[in-house]
């Protein structure tokens, strides 16, 4: 199996955030979706409505080696968050702000452009909760609620997840 590349992960995740039309009867949990990059020990997250209700792209060490009272053994690289931000800007996405990064095992890049309106609407439908069982809110496990969540269009990846 050919490992997917970071460019493919970003193509898929950013395409999902900004260019994918979601059905008007689907909901999406607000943390969004994650795409793994196993050979690099990374997981990338694409959150539609993070800080200031704007999209946030997150990079996490997939299998962090943590130690008590000490820094992790395998943090993000010193330039990794900067490089990720630069790649966003190169792709035409203005960066608002970054959080964390080296020497931590997680970093976030906040983008200035609003996610696709149909995705924002799907997140709003998630926050609204189950319409059949309003008292259960987002914690409902009924068929209707699960089917609504399952209708969200997922990112398209060229290679299967490892
Ligand atoms: Zn329900």
Image (spheres, helix red, strand yellow):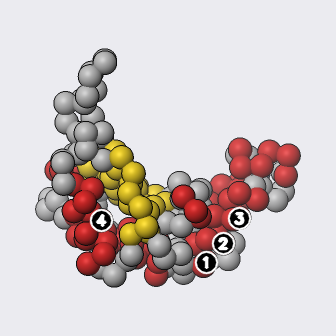
The Cα–Cα distance between marks 1 and 3, rounded to whole angstroms, is: 10 Å
List the residue tagged with mark 3: 125
Residue at 26% across, 49% down:
42
| Residue 151 showing in the rendered view | no
| Mark 2 crowdedness (10 Å alpha carbons): few <14, some 14-19, many ≥20 | some
Q: Does residue 64 sit above or below 124 in this rendering?
A: above
**What is the CA distance from the residue labelled 2 to the residue labelled 3?**
6 Å
- Mark 2 and mark 3 residues within 8 Å of each other at the beta carbon: yes
Q: Secondary structure at mark 3?
A: helix
Residue in the picture at 31% in, 72% down: 88
Image position of 20 with respect to 84: above or below: below
Residue for badge 1: 118
Secondary element at image label 2: helix
Q: Circles 3 and 4: CB distance less than 8 Å?
A: no
Q: Is residue 9 above or below residue 93?
A: above
> The residue tagged with tag 4: helix, strand or loop?
helix
Give x and y (percent) for residue 25. Answer: 69, 72
First along the sequence among labels 4 and 2: 4
Q: Is residue 15 left or right of residue 89?
A: right
Q: CA distance from mark 1 to mark 2?
A: 5 Å
Please identify, in this view, whether the residue under mark 3 or under mark 4 is nearer the observer. 4
x 77%, y 49%: residue: 137
Marks 1 and 2 in Cβ contact (< 8 Å): yes
Report which quarter residue 65 is drawn in.
top left
Mark 1 and mark 3 lie on one chain; the one further toward the N terminus is 1
Furthest residue toward left: 2
Q: Which residue is mark 4?
A: 85
Q: Earlier in the sequence, mark 3 or mark 4?
A: 4
Whether label 1 lies within 8 Å of ligand 1 gets the answer: no
Q: Residues within 10 Å of mark 3 (few under 14, many from 20)?
A: many
């Amino acid at each position: 199996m050919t490992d997917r590349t970071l460019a493919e992960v970003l193509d898929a995740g950013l395409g999902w955030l900004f260019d994918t039309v979601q059905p008007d009867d689907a909901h999406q949990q607000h943390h969004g979706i994650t795409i793994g990059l196993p050979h690099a020990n990374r997981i990338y997250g694409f959150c539609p409505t993070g800080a200031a209700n704007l999209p946030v792209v997150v990079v996490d060490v997939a299998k962090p080696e943590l130690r008590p009272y000490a820094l992790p053994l395998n943090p993000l690289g010193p330039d990794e968050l900067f490089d990720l931000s630069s790649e966003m800007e190169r792709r035409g996405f203005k960066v608002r702000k970054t959080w964390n990064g080296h020497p931590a095992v997680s970093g976030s890049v906040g983008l200035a452009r609003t996610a696709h309106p149909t995705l924002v609407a799907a997140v709003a439908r998630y926050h609204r909760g189950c319409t059949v069982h309003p008292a259960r809110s987002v914690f409902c496990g009924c068929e209707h609620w699960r089917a609504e969540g399952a209708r969200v269009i997922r990112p398209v990846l060229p290679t299967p997840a490892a």
